[in-house]
Amino acid sequence: MNKNILIPLREQDPFPSFLKEKHLVLEINRKEGEITTIYPFHVLPVEKIYFLGLGNGNQIKKTCMEFSRTIQEDVYVYVSKDLAYEVSLGLYLGAYQYKNKTQRVFEFSNGQEEAQKAQQLSKCINFARYISDCPRNILTPVRFKDYALEIANKYAIECEVYSNEELKKKGAHSILAVNSGSKYPAYIVKMKYSGNGNEPFIALVGKGLTFDSGGYSLKKNMTGMKYDMCGAANVLAVLEALAMLKAKVNCMAVLCITENMIGPDAYTVDDVISSMNGKTIEITNTDAEGRLALIDGFTIAQEENVNRMIDMATLTGACANALGENYTGAFTNDESFLQELKNVCQKTKENIWQMPLDESFHKQIRKSKVADLTNAQVGKKAGASLAAAFLEEFVEEKVSWIHLDIAATGNDENGATGVLIESIVNLLCS
């Protein structure tokens, strides 16, 4: 053993026996996040032993992420089998840095199989974080589409790419309207992982706006708008993880990829556009573009044998204002389906909060005098629920649906978070 040692300890965990044998017994601060460092000199062939306090064990993954960001070195992890998965996942997620591509290595004393599963999942999550952190001039819609194709080829996942000509033929004028100001084409990428015979698919639809200027409803502050594609990056990571783990589930990822830019052909307020399912939409705000990109993705997904659908999108500032930075807003047409996700999130410690969605919101979005729907309700409150109601107009009756608004949780001060990838993978694997 030549690596430094990490020993994570909950309040109830016994002191490691191998240190007792060496007469290295200390009073360690086990408060959550506390790091105690000792130097065993010639007693053990390592320079340092790190003790990491886990408190009552409610935030193991988060605590280990912070340790890995703080102590940027490889360690040998002395841990019980029941902690191996969460500790491994936290360490590998915390080791991610956009600028530093060095691969960190953590060896485990116990639970090697669990630790390896966590490491595999972390690769998918960290890849989603990486492409989300890419600047818009690097992650163009074309490059994003290529990343999806690389994953499809790697795991032999069935994949179809619809670009502008194909989208026109399919009548997907909603995403094309959003795309009309960009020099790059739009893409809807449909990827199908079949791990469970002829069973119906669960569809994951992700908003993939590689940059959002707001269009002619120009944003006052565009900082961070490269993260408007986190939803699509995250659902792509879920599909990759399912393929890597050879999960027994049929899952489809639909990535709705474009930019929202200004140009001579860009769509404007007061335009009326049509969607792929035939409904017409009055544009009242060109910055309410994410929902326009998603709905054609919904229709393409529902062309298949789909019985459940989850969409993920950095959709509304209203959701961020309502819930702050630690909760993802969740909307549904099937309470039992959402409860399944809530149960998983309790275990993964990823916070979601159900938001209201009823007929009163649908009535507001149907008040256009020139179209079936309006894409935004200028001056109205409850913007997150109104956006969800707009999306629900394009969900077929037979399909159980969850909308996840990750506007506040898709990224934080450290960059992209990969929020809810772990939870959705666990939901589908169960």
Image (cartoon, rainbow, N blue to C red):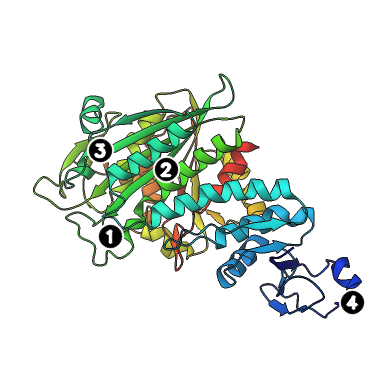
Cα distance in 3D space between marks 1 and 3: 23 Å
Measured along the vertical axis of the image, is residue 182 above or below residue 105?
above
Which label number is shown at residue 115?
A: none
Location of mark 1 (residue) = 379
Which label number is shown at residue 359?
A: 2
In the rendered image, the residue lying farthest to the top is 198
Of circles 3 and 4, which is in front?
A: 4
Where, by quadrant of the figure, is residue 191 drawn?
top left
Amino acid type indicated by mark 4: His
Amino acid type indicated by mark 3: Ser
- Sequence-earlier tag: 1 or 3: 3
Identify the image quadrant of the N terminus: bottom right
Amino acid type indicated by mark 1: Gly
Measured along the vertical axis of the image, is residue 104 above or below residue 295?
below
Of circles 1 and 2, which is in front?
A: 1
Cα distance in 3D space between marks 1 and 4: 69 Å
Location of mark 3 (residue) = 174
- Sequence-earlier tag: 4 or 2: 4
Of circles 1 and 3, which is in front?
A: 3
